[in-house]
């Protein structure tokens, strides 16, 4: 096997063990072969636990099985040696040529490096942000936008056909409160005045809407129609339509600045207009899973793991909020999305069981556990060592627009995916502006810019590096950097499977650290032409890996800093 012919080193090594397995334990030939990267370099490039897996079935000691597996491994031009460690782990050490082949692969594949076709053609929907059109997008919406867009990009990198969807909750009590808030402002009432509605929205944006309404402004709606404010303070319906359209436009503007685009915008109001909510309720009743009590209609969600049954239709004949959610997910299923990922705040945790229970009760073929959820914790914003809670425009929270204006889009997007979604995150404004290695996005982008600087000093054509012999790349730092480069496809695969873009952010930080260390200890433009070109090729490969990883997170790769 030639590393250049099959550039995926993990796959090649797995094939070697698959061949050995057929010899040592033919009855277990379908066993999973797991290859992991040891945490310590002295333990090799990959570790295989196959011997431990087989021990129980073969009723033999793992170390004895490991000896036989090693003896049965076919000859390989890229495997330098193997060692048995611990209870029976097989540590594999690769030759420098194997690591050098990674550089050749990256130069050859370019922007495609790290991508695969493992899920080619799989239809997936990712729903995220889905903010009520009752105010500006806040920092939590920003975290959703960064997470959802990155998850969608990761799935696309595995070959999935992804639809990004935004669900507008443009119906219900909150929208009515918005209309009343704007109406009160239009009538000259402001927060704190007598007659100000208790549940009204208090940000300055409400006054902006009211002023435009009184000025009889016209706003283009997302569907291309125009909403005209008639200026009539008593026309609450016109105020409602105008306010919702106004805020949808504002949210679209923020998302455009954040470079987040959606394929579909779905309106909650359409579920009522199309009769889908009524149809779901009829379906739940027909399923036999509902009952009447205290004038309300209940669903036996306890049959599906809920802690108590839930009301479907209240005694005043209105529906509870999870009913349109169930109707909405029925449309997802009917539209052919067998895999759906919803990115929502942890405050939506209670809706998971209810939505899934409703879908199961309808008995329309939806599998258990549909849809998938990624729940994110809220974000605390700090500046000058103190928490920032107030936005002049929004009133009681920091907006996404504030963050972008303070530190820039790239920093916001990188920071908001740099931790596990369910972990609380402190967004430090001062850190995001710092030009130091403590600032992760600066550190990663600076590594990319450093490569560009080296290439500019060289002045040659990077295309010629594709044919450069790489046998000069044998120093420890070079081997370490090449090993890190080889991890990107594995990281992308893992991040896509776990809906975890923070894995990519962490990898980029590690890769940048490897390169900065190499840069600080190495001269690239040396007199020896073969060494110079080989090192430049390694630098270009590093630049490509950084660029590819950043692109998945929606972050730019500047050539100068």
Image (cartoon, grey):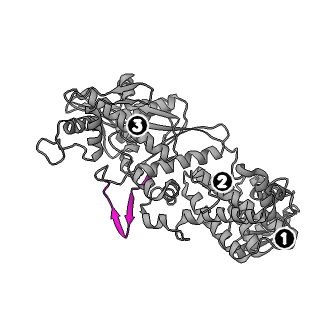
Of the numbered discs 3 and 2, the one sitting upstream in the chain is 3
Residue 61 in view (yes/no)? no
Residue 548, which numbered label? 2
Can you say whether 245 is above or below 71 in the image?
A: above
Q: Nearer the viewer, residue 467 or 143?
A: 467
* Residue 116 placement, left or right of 471: left
Q: How crowded is mark 2: few (under 14 residues within 10 Å), some or many (20 or more)?
A: many
Asked whether 382 falls inside the magenta stretch, the response is: yes
Which residue sits furthest left?
Answer: 194
Q: Label 1 vs label 3: CA separation?
A: 56 Å
Q: Position of residue 125 (x, y in %)?
A: 53, 38
Pick the quarter of the image with the N terminus. bottom right
Q: How crowded is mark 1: few (under 14 residues within 10 Å), some or many (20 or more)?
A: many
* Residue 392 placement, left or right of 158: left
Q: Which of 78 and 401 is in front in this view?
A: 401
For the image shown, how many numbered marks are present on the structure?
A: 3
Q: Residues within 10 Å of mark 3 (few under 14, many from 20)?
A: some
Q: Label 3 vs label 2: CA separation?
A: 32 Å
User: Which range is magenta?
Assistant: 374-391
Residue 249, which numbered label? 3
Q: Where is residue 119 in the image (x, y as percent from the top left)?
A: 66, 42
Residue 115, which numbered label? none
Q: Which of 450 and 64 is in front in this view?
A: 450
Residue on which disc 1 sits: 531
Q: Is there CB contact under 8 Å for labels 1 and 2?
A: no
């Amino acid at each position: 096997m030639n590393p250049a012919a099959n550039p995926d080193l993990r796959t090649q090594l797995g094939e070697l063990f698959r061949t050995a397995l057929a010899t040592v334990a033919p009855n277990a030939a379908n066993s999973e072969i797991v290859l992991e990267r040891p945490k310590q370099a002295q333990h090799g490039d990959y570790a295989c636990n196959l011997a431990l897996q087989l021990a129980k079935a073969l009723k033999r000691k793992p170390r004895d099985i490991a000896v036989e597996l090693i003896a049965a491994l076919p000859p390989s031009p890229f495997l330098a040696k193997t060692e048995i460690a611990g209870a029976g782990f097989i540590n594999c050490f690769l030759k420098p040529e194997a690591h050098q082949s990674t550089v050749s692969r990256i130069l050859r594949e370019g922007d495609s490096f790290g991508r695969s076709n493992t899920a080619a053609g799989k239809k997936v929907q990712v729903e995220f942000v889905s903010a009520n059109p009752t105010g500006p997008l806040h920092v939590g919406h920003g975290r959703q936008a960064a997470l959802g867009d990155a998850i969608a990009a990761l799935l696309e990198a595995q070959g999935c056909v992804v639809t990004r969807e935004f669900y507008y909750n443009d119906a219900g009590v909150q929208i009515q409160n918005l209309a009343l808030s704007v109406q009160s402002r239009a009538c000259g009432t402001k927060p704190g005045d007598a007659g100000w509605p208790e549940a009204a929205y208090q940000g300055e944006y409400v006054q902006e809407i009211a002023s435009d309404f009184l000025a009889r402004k016209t706003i283009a709606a997302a569907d291309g129609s125009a909403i005209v404010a008639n200026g009539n303070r008593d026309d609450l319906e016109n105020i409602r339509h105008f306010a919702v359209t106004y805020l949808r436009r504002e949210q679209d503007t923020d998302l455009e600045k954040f470079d987040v685009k959606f394929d579909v915008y779905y309106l909650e109001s359409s579920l009522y207009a199309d009769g889908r909510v009524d149809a779901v309720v009829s379906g739940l009743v027909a399923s036999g899973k509902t009952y009447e009590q205290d004038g309300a209609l209940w669903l036996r969600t306890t049959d599906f793991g809920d802690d108590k049954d839930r009301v479907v239709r209240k005694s005043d004949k209105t529906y509870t909020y999870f009913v349109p959610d169930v109707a909405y997910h029925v449309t997802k299923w009917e539209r052919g999305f067998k895999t759906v990922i919803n990115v929502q705040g942890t405050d939506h945790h209670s809706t998971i069981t209810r939505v899934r229970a409703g879908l199961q009760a309808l008995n329309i073929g939806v599998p258990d556990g549909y849809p998938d959820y990624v729940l994110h914790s809220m974000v605390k914003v700090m500046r000058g060592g103190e928490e920032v809670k107030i936005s002049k425009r929004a009133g009681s929270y920091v907006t996404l627009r504030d963050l972008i204006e303070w530190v820039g889009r790239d920093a916001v997007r990188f920071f908001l995916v740099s931790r596990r979604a369910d972990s609380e995150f402190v967004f430090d404004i001062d850190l995001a502006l710092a030009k130091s290695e403590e600032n992760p996005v600066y550190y990663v982008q600076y590594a990319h810019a450093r490569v560009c600087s080296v290439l500019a000093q060289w002045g040659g054509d990077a295309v010629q590096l594709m044919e450069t012999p790489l046998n000069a790349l044998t120093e420890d730092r070079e081997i370490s950097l090449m090993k890190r480069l080889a991890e990107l496809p594995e990281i992308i695969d893992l991040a896509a499977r776990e809906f975890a873009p923070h894995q990519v952010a962490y990898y980029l930080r590690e890769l940048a650290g490897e390169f900065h260390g190499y840069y600080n200890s190495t001269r690239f433009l040396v007199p020896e032409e073969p060494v110079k070109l080989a090192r430049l090729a390694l630098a270009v490969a590093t630049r490509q890996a950084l660029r590819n990883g950043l692109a998945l997170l929606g972050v730019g790769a500047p050539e100068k800093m």
